[in-house]
Amino acid sequence: MIELDDIDRKLLAALARDATQNASALGRRFGLSQPAAWRRIKRFHDDGIIKGRRLVLDREQLGFGVTVFLGVKLATKGRVSLDDFERAITAIPEIQSVEHVLGLYDYRLRVVARDLADFERVLRRRIMTMPGVGDVEANVLLSEERRIGPVESLVATDRT
Amino acid sequence: MLSNDDTKLLRLLQNDPSLSSTELGEALGLTSAAAWRRVEKLMATGVIQGQEAVIDWTKLGYLVEVSLRITLDKTQSRAFDEFIGAARDVPEVVEIQTFLGRVDVRLSVLARDMAHYQHIYRDAILTLPHIADIEALMQVSSLKDDERLPI
C-alpha cells in the first residue's frame, strides 16, 4: 500500500476536483516549488494512484435526458458464457458502466438515453435480446453527486 | 446546437481529456488557437463542466466497494434531505444517487477490507436517519466505467 503525506493528500483532493490545475498553480497553493509539486503529481501517475481523467459533460445539454440503472440477473447460469455476455454488454455505446456484483443481481449497468422512449428501444432491442438475460430491474436516476472519497482518512497512517 | 466540429472535439476529449489544444487542432484541421477557443466556448456554455482526476482506490488500500440500495421512510417529509445531508459526512461514501423506482437512494461505499466495511456499515451507515430498508451489492469487478456519452 502506498503511503501519502499531508501535502500529497491535499494535492490528490485538489486534482480529484479539478484535474486541469498545473504544478505551478498547485505548488503556490500548498507552499511547494513548481518542481516539487510536479514530482509529487508525477508519482501519482507513475504509481497508478491517479488512473486517468474524466471529462465532466452536461448530459442534458447534449440531449441525454435519461440515465437508468439496471440490475440484471442472468437466467441460465452455466449455459451462458459470462465472457460472451460481458463482451457484448460492454460494447453497447449507451451502456456507460458495467459492474459484476454479488447480491440480488449479477450485473449492474448504467444506461444513458435521449428520453424514456429511447431508453425503451435500447432495453428491448439491445439488452433484452441478449442470451441469458433474466430478471431486470430499472431505476431512473434523479440526482447524483460524486464525493471526493476518504482522502482525509489517509491522514491517520503517518501521524503520531 | 453543437456543430460537427464541436461534437468531434468532445469525442476526442472524452477519449483523452489530457489532449492539448495543439493536438485537438491537428485532429480537427484547426489552428491550436481556434481549437482552444472552441473548448473555451464549450466550457463557458457549461457543456464541459470540468475534468476530474480518477483515483484508483485499490492503490491506496481500499479493496472493497459496496453498493447500498436504500429505501427511506417516506412518512418523514424531510427523509431525503436529512439522509443525504448525513451521508455526505461519511468520508467513505463516494457516490450518492437518488432514483425513481424501487430504490430511493444508492450509496457507493469504499472500505479497506471486509472488517473495515463491517465497521463503517455498523457505525456510519446504519446510523443514518430514516432508513426503512437496505440491500447490499458487493462489487466483484468493474468491466466498464468510463461513463462516456455516445455522442
Image (cartoon, coloured by chain):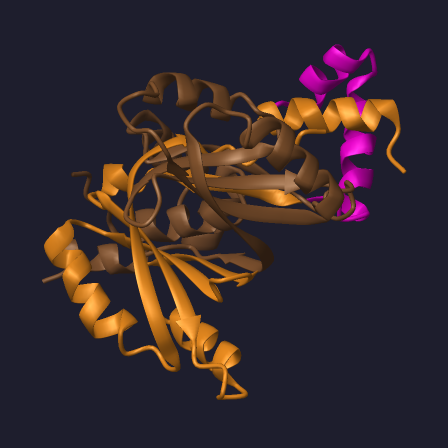
Decide: is B78 above or below A117: below
Decide: is B90 above or below A39: below
User: Which is the main secondary structure of the residues drawn in magenta?
Assistant: helix
Exactly how many numbered labels are in the figure? 0
Decide: is A66 above or below B11: below
Toward which corner of the image does residue A77 lie, by quadrant?
top left
Q: Going by the image, does B38 lie left or right of A26?
A: right
For the record, the magenta segment spans B19-48
Q: Colour of chain A?
A: brown
Q: In which quarter of the image is the C terminus of chain A?
A: bottom left
Q: In the rendered image, is residue A56 in sight?
A: no
Q: What is the x, y in percent for residue B43?
A: 75, 43
Question: In the rendered structure, does residue B20 fall within the stretch colored magenta?
Answer: yes
Q: What is the x, y in percent for residue B64?
A: 23, 46
- What's the residue at 49%, 88% (across, down)? B76
Q: Which residue lies furthest to the bottom in this view?
A: B76
Question: In the rendered structure, does residue A61 fall within the stretch colored magenta?
Answer: no
Q: In which quarter of the image is the N terminus of chain A?
A: top left
Q: What is the x, y in percent for residue B73?
A: 43, 81
- What's the residue at 76%, 17% (across, down)? B25
Q: In the rendered image, is residue B101 in sight?
A: yes
Question: Toward the viewer: A38 or A44?
Answer: A44
Toward which corner of the image does residue A48 lie, by quadrant?
top left
Question: Toward the viewer: A105 or B29?
Answer: A105
Q: What is the x, y in percent for residue A31?
A: 41, 52
Question: Toward the viewer: A138 or A5?
Answer: A138
Q: In the figure, the orange chain has which letter?
A: B
- What's the residue at 68%, 48% (across, down)? A66
Toward which corner of the image does residue A119 lie, by quadrant?
top right
